[in-house]
Amino acid sequence: MDFHLVHTITFFMLVVVATNATMLPPQLYWKSMLPTSLMPKAITNLLHPGKGGVDVGVRKGYYEGGGTDMNVGVGRSPFSYNYAASETQLHDKPNVALFFLEKDLHHGTKLNLQFTKTTSNAATFLPRQVANSIPFSLNKVEYIINKLNIKKGSKGVQIVKNTISECEEQGIKGEEKVCVTSLESMVDFTTSKLGKNVEAVSTEVNKESNLQQYTIASGVKKLGEKNKAVVCHKENYPYAVFYCHKTDTTKAYSVPLEGADGSRVKAIAVCHTDTSEWNPKHLAFQVLKVQPGTVPVCHLLPEDHVVWIRK
């Protein structure tokens, strides 16, 4: 994110905070709503500028700065059920390695993965009052790019349009989805679906790695109640936006990984037991050579994504 964008968002925050003296910081809102739930690293990283997460071989776009013309990669998220893989994405080894079958989720399975630092680490959470003061709609795109000082004609404009478009798409049958623009909104959506006795978990990576072979170690553990989870995927946007969704056919697992270089990762995997409504051209089906609705499909989550489960 470039200096002008940071300056613009900071200005929004100062104005809104000045006019809302009683505004509760996101951290305190979390504590008031979830007093017994620890905040995972994926969340704390986004409350403190300069602390980026780690991608597990997937990035649909990123900001690299460079004046007011942000250099971003543009593409669709492989975590969207409506997503159809392009020919380029089919040959993207890190993306392809994300997906596997649930029957392979056991000690000894080998996966080729890459953990790399995100470059969009400045895209932190805004307080809800600040986020709500900035429109988030395709009908307001021109207003948004002007207010956030994004250079017209840049790829930054396209990434904003793509993200909002993806957020406004109708979910598949049985999917409850929303894009949250603040931590407070994420907490509200999750507790409305799972109640307040919840836990948030995320992948924990100690260091970056090149594409290498990881082995699933002993200790794979099912998390939460059967098929009850809310998964929130970090979107590409000038500030933190998450695509959160819930279905009754999602299972979450804690998966210990050991890299060929000796590195260890505490990964979170999500398995989908019913994919019958997914796009038939989804990357998972093309990589795994299976048909929609036939077998459970799993994928690992990057470090800056969050899974919510009931305790």
Image (cartoon, grey):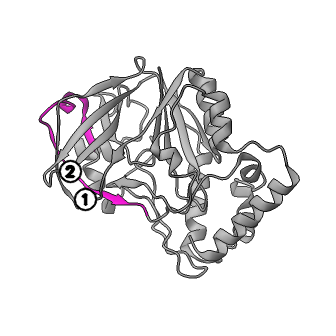
Relative vertical location of residue 195 with respect to residue 216 in this rendering, above or below = above
The answer to the question of whether label 2 and label 1 lie on touching residues, with beta carbons closer than 8 A, is yes
Residue located at (75% from left, 53% from top): 130
Q: Amino acid at mark 2?
A: Ser
Residue located at (42% from left, 61% from top): 118
* Residue 40 visible to an observer of this rendering: yes
- The quadrant the N terminus occupies is bottom right
Q: Residue furthest right?
A: 19
Residues 77 and 184: in front is 184
Give me the disc on residue 209.
1
For the residues labelled 2 and 1, the Cα–Cα distance comes to: 8 Å
Question: Magenta part of the protein: which range?
Answer: 99-118
Say few, some or many: other residues with alpha carbon within 10 Å of mark 1 (under 14 / 14 to 19 / 20 or more). Answer: some
Q: Amino acid at mark 1?
A: Ser
Q: Which residue is mark 2?
A: 263
* Nearer-N-terminus badge (2/1): 1
